[in-house]
Image (spheres, grey):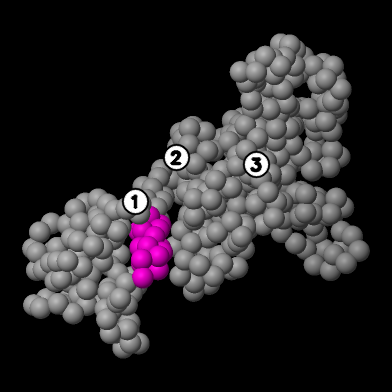
Amino acid sequence: MGRVLIVDDERDFCELLAADLKDRGWDARFLTRAEDALAADLDPDLDVVLTDLRMPGIDGLALCRGIVERRPDVPVVVMTAFGSMETAVAAIRAGAYDFVTKPIEADALELTLARALRHRELSEQVRFLTETAERAQSFDQLLGESRPMQRLFDSLSRLAETDVSVLIVGESGSGKELVARALHERGPRRAEAFVPVNCAAIPEALVESELFGHAKGAFTDARSSRTGLFEEASGGTLLLDEVGEIPIALQPKLLRALEEGRVRPVGSNEEHPVDVRLICATNRDLEAAVEEGRFREDLYFRINVVQVDVPPLRGRGRDILLLAQRFLERFAAQQGKPVTGLSRSVAEKLLAYRWPGNVRELRNCIERAVALTRCQELSVDDLPDKIRASRSTDLVVAGGDPSELVPMEVIEERYIRHVLEAVGGHRTTAARILGLDRKTLYRKLSKYGSSAD
C-alpha cells in the first residue's frame, strides 16, 4: 500500500500498530523519538509519516513543521488522545495533512493513510505534469512533445524568418491561427500588424469590400469610404482563414492583388499599393476543390508556396495530458479554485477520446470540468458525458483467435478508413500517407461503398 513511518514514544504501541499495518499490506516501521526522525535523512521512498502529538522533547507539531520544511512532498498524519478542534486546527496549521484520535480505530486509520498516500501520488503527478509542461518544447503559444509537433516546430523555425506565402492545413480547432501568429511573431514583420480574417464568417456579398475596401457611395449604405483588410495589414501579415470559402468569382481579383501588390477598393478607379505577407489556412482539401472547379488552380499555387500540416489532437499522444494540465492551471487560477491535477481515470478518458473538436474542444472540456469540480483533482464525473463514455478506438488488425482472421482486402479497407479518420477525412493527405494517388484512393473508397466525400 505504501511506506509509513510511525513516531511515538510508546514502543509497545508502535510495535502493535506497525504489525497491524503490515498485516494490511503497508510497509511500516517506527521510531520512538521525534529527534531521531529529524536527525536522519528521511527515506526517499517514504509515503506517509504518522506521529503522536504529545511526546517528550520535540512534540508532534514541531516534528510536523520540520518534515513539511524538509520534505513537503510527504504528508503527515497526527495522532492525539486530545481530539479537540483546537488540536485539529494546530495540526493543520503546522502543515499536517490530517489527524486521528486515540484510541486508534484500525479501519479509520487505514482510510486516512490511504487518502494521504493518494494525496502524495496526486502531488507527484501534478509536479511531474507541471515540470513536463514547463520544459516541453514550444513555439510561441504552441506546446507539444509528440513527434508530429516536433516536425511542425522544425518547419516553423525554418519558415519564420522568410517572407514566403504559407498554406496551413488542419482540422477545425487544431490551432491553425496559433501557427500563423507564431510565424508572424518570429518573422521579419513582427513589429507590424497581424490581421486575421475568417473568410467563412463574412457574407459572400461583403467579402470583396472586407478584403479590398470600398469607396463612398459604392453601394447602398456605403456612406463613407472604408479601408480594406489588405491595406490594414500592409507591412505586416494577413491571415485568410478558411480561404477555400472565398467565392470563385472573387478569386481572380485576389490573385491579381497578390501578384501585383495593389488593390482596388469597390467602386473606386484608383489602386492602392499593399505589401503583406500572406498566410492562408483551411480545413478543406483544396486540391480536390481545384479538380472540382471550386477553387482556381493558379490561385492555389500562389498561396501554397509552402504547406504546413497541423496534426489533429488525437494524433499527438500524451500531448493531450500536457495541454490539459496547462489549461487546468490557467482556469483554476482564473476561477480561484484549488484544483491541481488530473486523476488517473480522467487521464485515461482524455487519451481514449477522439477529440473531433481538437484543442478547442479540450480547452472547453477542461474549463467546464474545473468549474464543476469540488475536489482538488478532476474526476471522471466532472467530464462531459460523451468523454466519460469514450473507449479506445485504436486500430486492431487481428487477434490470436483464428475466427478473427480476415482477408487482406478487409485489412486494407480498415487501414484506409483508419488513416482517413486520423487526418480528419482530408483525402489528399490520406493519399500521401498511404502512398496512393488520389484517383486510386477514390476508386478504393467507391469499391468499399463510400463516396469520395
Residue 31 location, x and y as percent? 14, 63
Q: CA distance from mark 1 to mark 2?
A: 38 Å
Asked if the residues shown at circle 2 and circle 3 are in contact, with their CB atoms under 8 angstroms apart, the answer is no
Q: Which residue is mark 1?
A: 25
Discs 1, 3 touching: Cβ within 8 Å? no
Q: Nearer the viewer, mark 1 or mark 3?
A: 1
Mark 3: few/some/many CA within 10 Å (<14, 14-19, 20+): some
Q: Is residue 434 left or right of residue 321?
A: right
Pointer 1 local density, CA inside 10 Å: few below 14, some 14–19, many at least 20: few
103 and 289: which is toward the camera: 103
- Which quadrant of the structure image shows residue 165? top right
The span shown in magenta is 105-122
Dot 1 lies on which element? loop
Residue that numbered label 3 is attached to: 391
Compared across the picture, whether 438 is left or right of 304 comes to right
Tell me what residue is drawn at x 44 percent, y 45 percent: 138
> From mark 1 to mark 3, how far is it between C-alphas?
33 Å
Does residue 161 appear in the picture of this structure? Answer: no
Query: According to the image, label 2 marks what residue?
Result: 145
Q: Position of residue 164 (x, y in %)?
A: 56, 35
Q: Residue furthest right?
A: 220
* Tag of residue 328: none
Which is more N-terminal, label 2 or label 1? 1
Q: Earlier in the sequence, mark 1 or mark 3?
A: 1
